[in-house]
Structures are given as C-alpha cells and as structure tokens.
Amino acid sequence: MDNLRGKVAIVGAADTQVGKLPQFSPTGLCIDAARRAMADANITKGQIDGLITCNSMAEPYMYHAEAMAEYMQIFPRYCMSVVAGGSTTFSILHHAAAAIVSGMCTTVLITMADSLRSGLTRDQAMKMQSSAGHSQFEIPFGPTVPAFYALIARAHMHKYGTTAEQFAAIAVACRKHACLNPTAEMRTPITIDDVMNSRMIADPLHLLDCSLVSDGGSAIIMTSADRAADFPHDPVYILGVGEGHGHEHISQAQSLTTSFAVESGRRAYAMAGLRPSDMDFAQLYDCFTPTVLVELEDLGFCQKGEGGAFVENGNIELGGMLPVNTHGGLLSHCHPGNPGSMFALTETVTQLRGTAGARQVKDAKVAIVHGQGGIMSSHTTVILARERH
Amino acid sequence: MTGQMDKFLPRPTPESAPFWQGCRDHKLLLQYCTACGTHQFYPRVICANCMSEQLEWREASGRGTVETYTVVTRAVSDAYAADVPYVIALITLEEGPRMMSNVIGCDVESVKCGLAVEVIFEQWSAEITMPKFRPVTGQLAS
C-alpha cells in the first residue's frame, strides 16, 4: 500500500493562543486558527476547495464543517466533520490526503478548536465525562476518564512490572520540552517526585500524569506534493499513514496492554518504507502518561513490556535517543479535547521546517506522529518528512 | 438505595432487557451461542464471534477474576461522591467474557490483579439492580 506516499504535503500550519481564553468562543478560535494557517501558506480563502473540521463540545453544530464554511463564506467542494477522539487529527489527515490524491479537491483546510477550559457548562462537562464508556455496562459503575486509563496502566504494571515512577518520567520529559516552548501552558520544571507526590486521581495515576484542560485551536493547509513548491515555506511531506480500530469500550478490548497502534503503525511504516529506527523524533498521544509508554512499544521503538525502561534516563527527552512530544504534549503544552493532536502536528511541521528554536531537534528529517481516541480505541499513525523521498 | 437514583442508571434495550431482568432476579445471565459454543457479554442481537442469531440466555457461575482495577479518589459526579474511594475493575468471568464492575465489601487496598471475586446484586431502583462483585474469601485465583 504506497498510493499516498509522498503525494501530499502540508504547506501551512498555525496555532491560536492556548490556555484559558474566555474572551474567545470555540468558533472564534477555529476561525482564528484557519486565518493564521492561510496566512502561513500565503493563500486566500477562495483557494480552499476542501474543508475538514471536528465538532466542538462547548459549541457544537449539527454540521460543523458546513457551519465553519458558512462562517468564513467559503464554498468548498469537499466538506466534512470527523470525530475519532484523540485520533481525530490524524484520521482527518488520512481522509484529506486521500481526497487530494483522488482529485476530490486540491487544497484542504483542516481546522479545529475547542474551549474545554472556559466554554463548558456544568451539564456539558458532566456529559463529556459520562459519554466516555458504555451507557449500560460501564458508565453506571462510576468510571472517570482517568480511571479508564488507570485500568490500562495497572494492567501494564501487573503484566510487565512497569512502575508509577516510569509513567512519571514521561510527564517530566514533556514538561522539560514545554519549558523550552514559549507557547506552552506549563513552563515550570517538574521532577519524578513532584509527579509521585501530586494528588492521586485514579490509582496509579496522579494529577501530573493527567493532561491539561485547555482552550485553543490549530489548523493546517494541505495540497498535492506537485503544487507544494508554490508556497512560501518548505513543505512537509506525508510518507505514510495508517489506522487501526480495535474497540470502542475498554471492557471489550482484545488486549489491555497491546493496542491497535500496532496495526496503524505497521500500515504507516509499510507505506513509508521506513522503520522505527528511521524516526528522528515522535509525537505520541499523551492524554495520560501510560498511553505514551504503550505507544512506544506498539509502534516498535522497544520490545513489548520494555516501555518502562525505555522512557527512563532521558531517552525520550531532547538530546535523548528519541525525543517525544517536543512541544510539551497534551500533558504540558495544552489539551483542548479532540483538537489536541493538531498541536503535535503543527509542532512536527515546525520541527521539520527547522524553525523550532530552543527545542529544535538537530537535523530533524523524519517524524512519526500518533493519535489515539476513545480509550485506546482508534489509532492513527502518520509519518512526515522534510524530503519527498 | 438512597441517592442511587442520581447515578447514571442504565437504560435497558430490547437486546439487554433479559440481562437486567436476570439482575433483578439475582442471576447473572450471559448469552451463549449454540452455533459456535461461545459466551458473550455485552448482549447483542448476533454472536460477535460467528454472526449467528442462535443465542440463548444461560446463567453464569457468577465467579471471576480481577484482570485490572483502579481506585477512584475523585468521583465522576456528586452522586458517586459518597462512594469514594471506590474500585472500578475489569473482571474476567469463568465463562470467558470480561465485564466492568465495582468490587465492594472489602478494603479497597485489598483489591489486586488476580483476585477471585463473585457477583452480588445491589438494587438501585424498581427496574435496575446492578451486578457488583466481592472477594471470594481467602482465595487468590491462579
């Protein structure tokens, strides 16, 4: 399967402000992200003929992408909303690439934003908590979102001897990177002890094992690789993309310790013709620290069960073997919900353009980005590169 | 039953109604496929293993093993606050299927992966009785 390899490129990328932004609506942030990405690509709205968004929890529309098109008065020939939880960003990228290659459109704007910090009513917040899980066979027992991930963490600890301190090392690495990123929300260094001493939320997950709750938006512009030279910045090419969908509800997962990131990763590597050792850095979905550890294993950066040892000793920090979440991730940069992975994507573009400043990965040429949604349910892996190959 | 009505009560569907009726009768019922010989949970209109419609309801032993668990110290909503700290567990039943439930009737610190548990029933409303689990005294499953 190599039909998308090197055929599409990201030619514009931008984020809004992130953090606590009560002065903006989710729609306002979504449009602001779009405006910034168009400016980055130096295109006008009339050049956009494809639009993909995901719905906002704080300000939902029945047909979100159509509503955003209407708001900007653009009239695309390809228009849709996608929701795949945290995997949304990269599954959207997959759909957009396919749409461009098949000729359904030429220039796609992907924009998304939400205001989980400032925009949710109490009812919406409650609905968000209680919509994760099966309405009859999970939710009534009172699981929280951290509790779902704690089940995975505990299973990994039991099976492989992974420790809470090893999960904490992931939070420490993300914070270290956020400290080098002027746009990140959390820029005070933390230690493993700080994580271990933070409030227990759902054993074994402490407060600092959990991602942020933020307002913010982010957008990219994609087009065919053949047109990519017409834009002001160096294009970033998509070499591989793959999805894997294992379940919706964690109680139905085939395995609690191995995820369908194995499938999405295998498909992305096969399309790209590359291996884990070819990756200069990785952006791995980090709604809670254990997800990064499982993804490192399932994407082939270490053997199954050895993720705990892999994340120790600065291996996943800048300057280490595989820098992970160079912007600070959902744990320390920002996390406005489904749009969360967009920031990992725009950061990847920044790194591959070589403009990441103090947090620049030296000689960054190829990167892997991975999103998972639900409770380790939907997985999408993308491999991006500076060269078309 | 005080306060249970404010919890997230399950709403039975046509395919799950026999399961919830079983809980009211203090029986843990599972679907069994007579075509391929497997039990399944949650209830479905087909066997998810072979897509057969040849499903019948059978009473399970009610015994299982804690595969993984967490202790929730921050409740999902006010209705669950009085239960804190409470255990959320994934329990593998003797018949094979896995289900989520609470492990109750013991110190939360005593819950471990591999703990042998058995079903007990907790009435929440006239219609809804919840299947919960408690440790089988003195046993740790292999």
Image (cartoon, coloured by chain):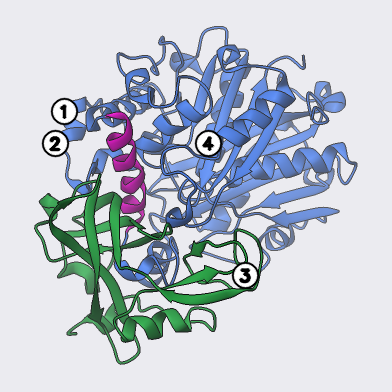
Chain colours: A blue, B green
Q: Is residue A191 above or below residue A145?
A: above
- Residue A22 is covered by the magenta coloring: no
Residue named by callout 2: A197
Front position among marks 3 and 4: 3
Give the position of the N terminus of chain B as an image quadrant: bottom left
Q: In whole angstroms, how far apart are the C-alphas of marks 4 and 1?
A: 28 Å
Q: Same chain for marks 3 and 4?
A: no
Report if the CB atoms under discs 2 and 1 are less than 8 Å apart. Answer: yes
Q: Same chain for marks 4 and 2?
A: yes
Q: Residues within 10 Å of mark 2 (few under 14, many from 20)?
A: few
Residue found at the very far bottom of the displayed protein: B126
Q: Given the image, what chain letter belongs to the residue carrying mark 1?
A: A
State the image quarter where residue A271 is shown: top right
State the image quarter where residue B25 is shown: bottom left
Residue named by callout 4: A343
Residue named by callout 1: A193
Report if the CB atoms under discs 3 and 1 are less than 8 Å apart. Answer: no
Instruction: Please name the amino acid that badge 1 sits on.
Output: Asp
Q: Secondary structure at mark 2?
A: helix
